[in-house]
């Protein structure tokens, strides 16, 4: 496998804006203001479009940062295999960066992963292993336990451990947070993000709290069935967010002291928001974006006039066309699509 490390940057006189690789496209994602969904609300809502990263999600940031940090420390050897358990986006980010840095990637995934995400992972050359995503933390068939065993059995393998790796929140502390602060010229008053591994809200929220001397209010968005909000564990039908495990088994990188509050958004509203974003704002985003943006609408509704609510849209909707935009799948998942914004079930 060739890697970007094997090739010196090409100098192209007179063409100063040529990047040396796709890794340079990671970060510096745009903010776009919603116009239709929050019409008439006292607060403005600015959406940070993480689908503009080359792998299509915010997880590209942590993939690059975890790999570069491990390479620098010697923990990840040249050409060594990367092993991770992922519902899709972190796996895609690792596969993308691994392809460019000469590292084979093995991803342990759930049987519920969308066909689109599997296709992207395979396109980037990842090896896929399906696990029981419902298995508890002490079950040997648990995805993380399976990833640990595969890493132990693979010579020189490196287990990226996104749930415990400090480079995950640090990526957001050093990139996402400063970008938002700069893009809003320090006027951001509220920050909203879904909680999956906890890296985005911990790193970005911590930076914004520190930069604003505590003025920015940090809000977590949680799906039904997740325990981050203190509710009982149940079925989660929103990809990439929430946890069904008790607090004692929450990801080590998630700092529950960073969010000022955590709001639960019901499943039907999550998917209705996804449909409305496409129909009214021409933004094709994924379910975790619908979750966070629905929470941001609630925040903007109660905010002081002139408030600036920044919300993370973790990924795009292209990887969920067979799920979030498929009424049959939603019905099977227990989400009634009747009356959704795009009228597809009329």
Image (tube, helix red, strand yellow):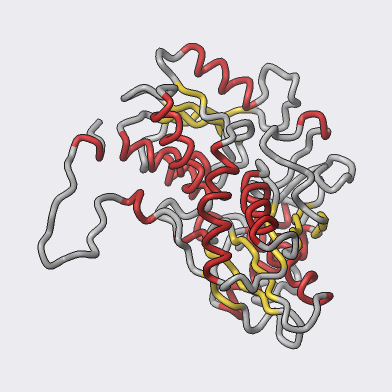
Frontmost residue, 283 versus 323: 283
To which quarter of the image does residue 156 belong? Answer: top left
Q: Position of residue 79 (x, y in %)?
A: 32, 24
Frontmost residue, 259 versus 36: 259
To which quarter of the image does residue 98 belong? Answer: top left
Residue depicted at x 72% and y 51%: 332
Residue depicted at x 46% and y 23%: 158
Total numbered labels: 0
Q: Position of residue 219 (x, y in %)?
A: 76, 59
Quarter holding the N terminus is top left
To which quarter of the image does residue 194 belong? Answer: bottom right
The residue lying furthest to the left in this view is 13
Residue depicted at x 82% and y 42%: 227
Left or right, 248 with respect to 71, comes to: right
Q: Is residue 176 above or below residue 256?
A: below
Left or right, 60 with respect to 140, comes to: left
Left or right, 200 with respect to 152, comes to: right
Q: Is residue 211 above or below residue 233?
A: below
The residue lying furthest to the bottom in this view is 40
Q: Is residue 293 above or below residue 99?
A: below
Q: Position of residue 151 (x, y in %)?
A: 50, 18
Q: Position of residue 38 (x, y in %)?
A: 71, 80
Quarter holding the C terminus is bottom right
Residue depicted at x 79% and y 45%: 257
């Amino acid at each position: 496998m060739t890697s970007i490390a094997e090739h010196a940057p090409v100098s192209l006189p007179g063409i100063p804006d040529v990047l040396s690789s796709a890794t340079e496209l990671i970060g510096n994602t745009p903010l776009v203001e919603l116009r239709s969904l929050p019409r008439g609300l006292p607060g403005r809502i600015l959406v940070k479009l993480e689908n503009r990263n080359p792998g299509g999600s915010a997880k590209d940031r942590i993939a690059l940062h975890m790999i570069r940090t491990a390479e620098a420390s010697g923990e990840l050897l040249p050409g060594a295999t990367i092993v991770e358990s992922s519902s899709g986006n972190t796996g895609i980010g690792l596969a993308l960066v691994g392809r460019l840095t000469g590292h084979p990637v093995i991803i342990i995934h759930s049987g519920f992963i969308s066909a689109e995400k599997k296709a992207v992972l395979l396109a980037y050359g990842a090896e896929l292993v399906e696990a029981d995503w419902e298995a508890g933390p002490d079950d040997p068939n648990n995805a993380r336990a399976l990833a640990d065993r595969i890493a132990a059995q693979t010579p020189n393998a490196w287990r990226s451990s996104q749930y415990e790796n400090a480079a995950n929140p640090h990526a957001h502390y050093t990139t996402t947070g400063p970008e938002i602060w700069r893009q809003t010229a320090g006027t951001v008053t509220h920050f909203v993000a879904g909680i999956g591994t906890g890296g985005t809200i911990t790193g970005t929220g911590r930076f914004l709290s520190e930069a604003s001397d505590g003025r920015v209010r940090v809000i977590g968005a949680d799906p039904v069935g997740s325990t981050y909000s203190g509710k009982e564990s149940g079925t989660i039908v929103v990809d990439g967010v929430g946890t069904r495990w008790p607090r004692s088994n929450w990801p080590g990188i998630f700092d529950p002291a960073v969010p000022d509050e955590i709001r639960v958004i019901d499943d039907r509203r999550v998917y209705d928001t996804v449909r409305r974003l496409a129909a009214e704002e021409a933004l094709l985003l994924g379910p975790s974006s619908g979750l966070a943006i629905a929470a941001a609408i609630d925040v903007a509704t109660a905010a002081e006039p002139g408030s600036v609510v920044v919300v993370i849209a973790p990924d795009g909707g292209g990887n969920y066309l067979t799920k979030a935009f498929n009424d049959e799948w939603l019905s099977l998942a227990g989400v009634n699509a009747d009356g959704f914004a795009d009228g597809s079930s009329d």
